[in-house]
Amino acid sequence: MEETKELLKKDWDESAKLHMLMAIYGFETTKKAKLVLELMEKIEGGDESYPLNFYIDTAKQYDTVDEALEYLQRECFICFDSFIIQEMVAMLNCKHEVCKDCF
């Protein structure tokens, strides 16, 4: 899967990338495949980097970049840093989430 991620980072035509995502991951429309590329562009351009399956799974569940980013990037209630959902711990008595370091 990470080999595919490296291919998506190449300077290829967007249409080729979209069709590759559709063929490999079963996206029925280019809209979901495009969401993967948009998420990668927004997140990989910063300090974060997630495995490709995070982008794929998120694109299958959400329709917009904003919804997907809200799911992928969570803010710790204590230190206010942003973390991926897998690095967060949900508090049982409330709806707050904290990072594993603050837990």
Image (cartoon, grey):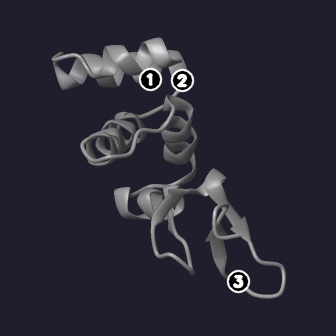
Q: Which residue is mark 3?
A: 95
- Residue 16: name its quadrant: top left
First of labels 3, 1 by sequence position: 1
Q: Amino acid at mark 3?
A: Lys
Asked which secondary structure carries label 3, the reply is loop
Q: Nearer the viewer, mark 3 or mark 2?
A: 3
Asked which secondary structure carries label 2, the reply is helix
Q: Residue at x 16, y 17 (%)?
A: 11
- Residue 37: name its quadrant: top left
Q: Which residue is mark 1?
A: 22
For residue 25, which numbered disc appears in the image? Answer: 2
| Residue 91 placement (x, y as % from top left) | 77, 77
Q: Amino acid at mark 2?
A: Tyr
* Front in this rendered view, residue 40 or 98: 98
Asked which secondary structure carries label 1, the reply is helix
* Front in this rendered view, residue 99 or 55: 99
- For the residues labelled 3 and 1, say whether their Cβ atoms are less than 8 Å apart: no
Residues packed near mark 3 inside 10 Å, few (<14), some (14 to 19) or many (20 plus): few
